[in-house]
Image: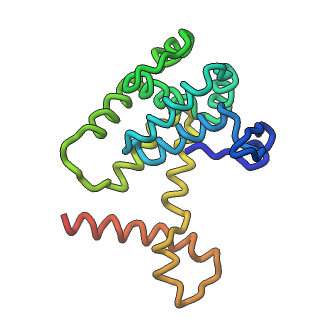
Amino acid sequence: PLPLSMEYLKQSLEDTIIFNQKISTLSPENNLLLLCGHGTKDCWNKLSRISDIAELINYYPQLNWQLLLKEAKNRGALRLVLVGLSLANRLYQISLPDFLYDEINKDTKIKSLVNKIENILFMASNTKKKILRQFLFQIQFRERFKDKIKPIFNLIFLPNYIDWLLFAPYELPLICYYFLSPFTLLFKIVFKLKNQ
């Protein structure tokens, strides 16, 4: 949900000392972007994802919030970042700058998403994730239309490991897997519907 290129990440590396060794690490802003993207990818199914965000904010009180928001907006990922911050605020009482509360309150979907996530996290039943439900849930985090279309296109046409396994013995040209992917997806949907 939040692709960041290696070139971009390398531009903002920071040095830190661990066991008397100087190593390069992500800037706190990029680390926070990635944590929010990772939480969204997994539908915020683990409390540890939110705890990581809260700990990062506690450790870096000088975080450049303006830069974080700018990068999130540029990538069409403002909502997923604000959901992550809102979760850290609600579940770990992390205080945020006033302008971030304003941003969170501006987007009416954030409160609904946070409530859904809290319900999922604290449900007693341990139900299996439904791939389609998970996919539709992730789409709600996207603000821009083009960012909603791309994952749909990827779901339909991007080959996955099942496509490679099913047709591996035939050693088809690579382009064929992109055309077979919609059929294997349709087969999986029909098979699951039939078995319900």
Identify the residue shown where x is 38% and y is 22%: 90
Residue at the image position 32 percent from the left and 55 percent from the top:
130
Compare residues 21 and 77 and report the one nearer the observer: 21
Q: On the rendered image, what quadrant is the N terminus found in?
A: top right
Q: Residue at x 73, y 40 (%)?
A: 17
The correct choice, above or below, for 19 with respect to 71 in the image is: below
Is 188 situated left or right of 84 in this image?
left
**Residue 180: percent from the left, percent from the top?**
51, 74
Q: Closer to the camera, 14 or 102?
A: 14
Q: Nearer the viewer, residue 158 or 66?
A: 66
Quarter occupied by the C terminus: bottom left
The reply, left or right, for residue 98 in relation to residue 68 is left
Residue found farthest to the top: 98
Q: Is residue 106 above or below residue 116?
A: above
Residue 25 percent coordinates (x, y): 71, 42
Residue at image coords 81%, 40%: 11
